[in-house]
Structures are given as structure tokens and as C-alpha cells.
Image (cartoon, grey):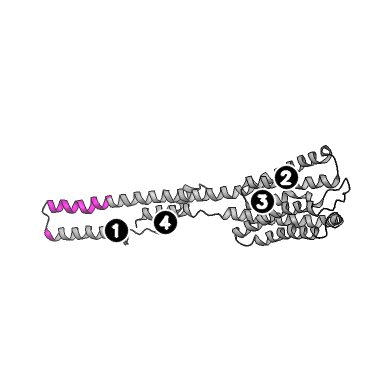
Amino acid sequence: MSVAGEGEGAGRRRSRDRSTAAADRLLRMFVRFVSIGYLCYLVLLVPAIVAQAQLTAPWWTPVAVFVIFGSGAALGLESFRSVTRIKRVAAVNALAYPVVVALWFVAWNGAPAPPDDSLWFTLFPGVASFAAVAAWRPRWAVVHMLVAVLLAQSANHVVREAPFSSFLAPDLAFALTFCSLFLAAAVVALGTGRTLDDTIATTHATAAAAAAAEARNAERERFDALVHDRVMSTLLAAARRAPQDSLVQQARRAVDEIDELRAGTDIRTRIDAGTVLARLRSAATEVDED
């Protein structure tokens, strides 16, 4: 294969095998942040969890704590594993929250909560939606946030027996606005990693294409020089009836150079270290002047 063909092949391979290093690194950092968020909320909400356990059937509170915070902790541990596993655990954690909150309506025993208290799980629906951002496309993360916030605030409204206009409407508006801001920031942050990977892949492909074009031009120039200096001069010498011995030697040199060009074994055109460094510097500058 020629140098130009190798350059083009490498460029195509790099385009197919686009690196996802930046996106993966951001995803790992993001899910660790989500896991730490769950841990902080657990520490802060222990008194409320214990106090509000009397509002539901005995099984619901331990199941809810284990499923929500346990899957959140597992998400942090999985951040050191493969990206596929991270997304699977993030999906489990994202689904855990609305399922657990929906089960609250089944487990609730009808006892009212103090008017000024909020149910403990209504304080962090956005964290579960962060996990949805890590697992799914942005539009599904938005759907998750809408469902999670609606379920949580509806539970708050039911347990406090307050009029719609007094609690549910403003609580829904505040929760959706608050969560939307952070959800949008999360989507943009993870999208930045994908954009960076795409930019790097495009830059590599462009550099490979430029190198292939330069190699192609160099090959063409060398072949043109060989044809002009060796082949044509040999044919002219034969047309002028040059001495047989010199013509044979000249023809042999031309054939040898053509064979070396085809096989890539020409050792007479090696370049020194300074030239190699200059060409590397030139190639690097084409990619980034800095």
C-alpha cells in the first residue's frame, strides 16, 4: 500500500472509531456527583425519615430508603466500571424514585402530616432526574423530571389536606423551575464531552487527510522526477544509439529505482533528524498553531 493510501485508511479508521474519552470522563464525574448528592440528602433527612415513618405501612420506609439511596450508592461505585454498566445502574436509580413515590400512595395510612412539613422524598426529585440524564436522552430525562415532581408534590398535597391553590400549584411551579435549571445544566455538561470528542475526531481526520494529500503529492513528485531523470533519459540515450554498456547500466539503474519506489525500500532518500523534526512541527502547526 502506498503512503497516501495508508494515510487515507488511517483517517477512515479514526472516523469510524471515534474516541469517547472526554464524554466518558465527564459521565463518571457526573454520576459520582449524583451519588454524593444522595449521600448528603440521606444524612440530612434521617430525622424526617424516622418521624414520617408513622404515616405509611411499616414496609414502605425501609424499602424506599434502600431502593433510592442504595441504588444511588451503587451508582457511585459503578462509576469505576464500564460506561454501559454506569448507564444501566443510572437507569435503575432514575426509575426507582417514581416507582417508590407511587407506592407511597398505596402504603399511606391516611394520617395527615403537619401543615408546614414536606414529605422527605419531595426534597430531591431533581437528583433522580440527574440519574436519568446519565442514562437516557435529554427528552426522556425531562419526562422523568415532570413525572417525578408531579408525583412528589401530589403526595405532599394529599398528606397535608390543603387546597390546590395553597400548596400544590405553587409547589409544582417552584419544583419544576428549580429542577429544570439544574437539569439543563447537566444536559449541557454531558453534551460538552460529546462535542469535545467529536471535535477531536474531526481534527484527527482532517490532519490525516492533509498528511495523505501531502504524501500523495510527494509520491507524484518523486515519480515524475524518476520518469524524467531516469526513464526518459534512458529512452533518449537508446534513440541516440548510445554505447551498449552505458545504456544497459543506465536502464538497470532506472529499473532498480522503479522497483525501490514500488517496494518502498529505497534507503538513499533517508532524511536526517532535523528534517523529521521540521516536518513534525509543520504537521502539528497545521492542527493547532499553539
Give the residue type that dot 1 points to.
Answer: Arg
The picture places residue 59, in percent across and down from the top left corner, at: 80, 60
**Residue sitting nearer the eye, 15 or 78:** 78
How many angstroms separate mark 1 from mark 2 (CA)?
65 Å
The picture places residue 230, in percent across and down from the top left corner, at: 22, 54
Give the labeled residue for mark 4. Answer: 276
Q: Is residue 147 left or right of residue 211?
A: right
**Secondary structure category for the residue under label 3:** helix
Q: Decide if residue 185 is in sight here.
A: no
Of the two numbered discs 2 and 3 on the same chain, state the one appearing first in sequence: 3
Give the labeled residue for mark 1. Answer: 262
Mark 2, mark 4: which one is toward the viewer?
2
Of the two numbered discs 4 and 1 on the same chain, state the one appearing first in sequence: 1
Q: Residues within 10 Å of mark 1 (few under 14, many from 20)?
A: few
Of the two numbered discs 3 and 4 on the same chain, state the one appearing first in sequence: 3
Give the labeled residue for mark 2. Answer: 179
Q: Residues within 10 Å of mark 2 (few under 14, many from 20)?
A: many
**Residue at the (78%, 54%) spot, across then down:** 41
**Residue at the (39%, 59%) spot, across then down:** 272
Q: What span is colored magenta in the figure?
A: 224-244
Give the labeled residue for mark 3. Answer: 132
Query: Do the numbered discs 1 and 3 sit on residues whose CB atoms are within 8 Å?
Result: no
Q: Decide if residue 189 is in sight here.
A: yes
Query: Do the numbered discs 4 and 1 sit on residues whose CB atoms are within 8 Å?
Result: no
Of the two numbered discs 1 and 2 on the same chain, state the one appearing first in sequence: 2
**Residue sitting nearer the eye, 254 or 206:** 206
